[in-house]
Amino acid sequence: MSYLVTGGRVISPRDGIDERSDVLIDGGHIETIGQGLSAKGAERVDATGLIVCPGFVDLHAHLREPGREDEETIASGSDAGAAGGFTALCAMPNTQPVADSASIVEKVWALGREAGTLQVVPAGALSVGLEGERMAAYGAMATSAARVKLFTDDGHGVQDAGFARRAMEYLVAFDGIYAEHCEDAGLAAGGHMHEGERSSSLGLRGVPAAAEEIMAARDIDLCRLTGCRLHLLHISTARTVELVRRAKDEGLPVTAEATPHHFALTDELVESYDPNAKVNPPLRTDEDCAAIRAGLADGTIDAIATDHAPHAPEEKELDFASAPPGMIGLETALAITMTELVQPGVLSLDAAIDLLSARPAAILGLDEQGSIAQGRAANVAIFSPDERWTVDPNAFRSKSRNTPFAGREVVGRVRYTFFEGRLVYSGVAE
Ligand code: NCD
Ligand code: ZN
C-alpha cells in the first residue's frame, strides 16, 4: 500500500526540514518529499492545515504485560500509543514477572512485533526482581532479540550506592544506559504527595523534593566515576533540573526526561483528593513546574516522556492514601505539550517535536525513528496544531482510564499515525 500525504507542513528537526510539502510513502519507506507530487494508485491523505512530523518516541511507558493484562496489554498499549502519535515506546520492566531476563524481554519484544502498531523497545531490570540486590543478566538481555539498551528498576530507586556503581561499571562495557527512578526510600517512606505547605494542610504525609535530588546527585557522581551513560527518569524538581544542567556543562553523559503532568500540573490538584492526581514522583510546586518548563526550553531536559502508568478502576477508586501512584498519558501527551508549552510560547513547534521524537530516538539509538527524510522508514505522526477537544477517557484506546486530565479542554490532536509505512491510526476531525 502506498500513501500520498498532501499539503501538510512537514517538520523534521533532525533533518532541518520545515516546509509545505507532499510526502509519498511506499514500501514502508518515505519515497519522496516534494511539492506537487502525484502517484498512481496511492491512497491520498489530505494534510492541509496539519503538521507532518516524525512519529513520537516515548522513553517511559508501562504496558503491564505480563501480569496485569486487565490494566493494559502490549497490544492495547501499542494502540493507545499509535492514537497518541507514537511510533516507538520503551516498555518498563516492572511487570509480573519482572523483565529481568532474556526470556521475558524477548517475550515483550515478540508481543510488540505481533501487535505491529509501533516499535516496542523493552527495558530490562537493573536488579533481579527489582529487589536491588543481585544484578540482572544485562549481557544476555542486550544480546537477545530484544536488544535491550536501557536498564532500570523503575518504580523503585536503587538504594545501595555500591550496587548502583557495580551496575554502571558493568553497563559501560556495552554502552548500556543506567536509568534511575530517583527516590530515596527512607525519605519517601509513607509519603503520598509532595511534602510542603499543602501536604500539611491536607493532612497527607509528604515526599520531600530531597528524596529525588539526593539520588540524582549521587548518580551523577557515580556517572562521573564510572563513565556509564545515565538517564534520569521523570525528573520533577527545580534542583534536579539544575543538577542535570551542571552535569551537562561538565560534559557528563547524562540525559533526563520530564512528563507532561510534571510540566502541566502542581500539588494544588491534590486538594481534590482525586486519586488520579497521585503519581510518583508526586506533582510538585509552581516553582518546580516552572523549572521543568525552563529545562525543556533550554535543552537541559532531553525528552518528553509519558510515564504512562495504567491502573485498574478498583485500585484508583480507593481513598488517596490507599490508591497506587500513576497516571496514563500516551493519548494526551501531544495535546498537553501543545496546550501548556507551544501555545504559551515556552517551546517552538520545532523544539516540541524534537523533544517528542528525534531526541528520545537518539537516546535509545533507534535508527528508524525520529526522522522523516527520504529513504527512511515511514514512522510518521500527522496532527492538527489548533484543533480543540475535550479529554474523554472513555474514548481512549488504553484499557485504563486513570488520567487527571479528564474533562480538560486542550488544543492539538493526532489525526494519523504511520508505522513502517502502514496507516495504524486514523482519527476523525470533530
Ligand atoms: C509507575 C507504575 O505505576 O508502574 N507509577 C508511577 O506513579 N509513576 C511506576 C513509576 O514510573 O515509578
Ligand atoms: Zn518511576
Image: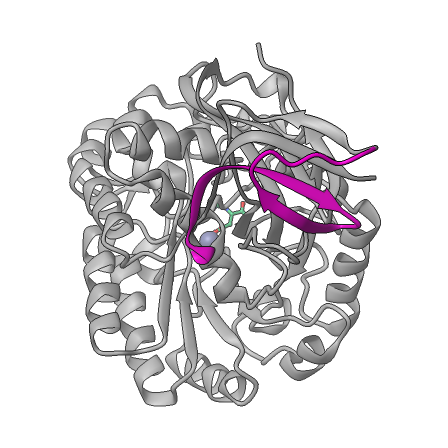
Q: Is residue 212 above or below residue 125?
A: above
Q: Residue at x 30, y 84 (%)?
A: 224
Color style of the picture: one colour
Q: Residue at x 64, y 48 (%)?
A: 32
Instruction: Pinpoint residue 22: horizontal percent, then vertical percent.
Output: 59, 36
In this orientation, which residue lies closer to the viewer: 416 or 91?
A: 416
In this orientation, which residue lies closer to the viewer: 407 or 132?
A: 407
Quadrant occupied by the C terminus:
top right
Instruction: Pinpoint residue 349: horizontal percent, then vertical percent.
Output: 36, 38
Residue 415's image quarter?
top right
Q: Is residue 205 above or below residue 164?
A: above
Q: Residue at x 34, y 82 (%)?
A: 222
Can residue 203 be seen from the camera position used here? no
Can residue 121 be seen from the camera position used here? yes
Residue 42's image quarter?
top right
Instruction: Pinpoint residue 157: horizontal percent, then vertical percent.
Output: 43, 64
In this orientation, which residue lies closer to the viewer: 199 or 53?
A: 53
Relative side of 424 to 215, left or right: right
Quadrant occupied by the N terminus:
top right
Relative side of 239 to 430, left or right: left
State which region is magenta. 14-40
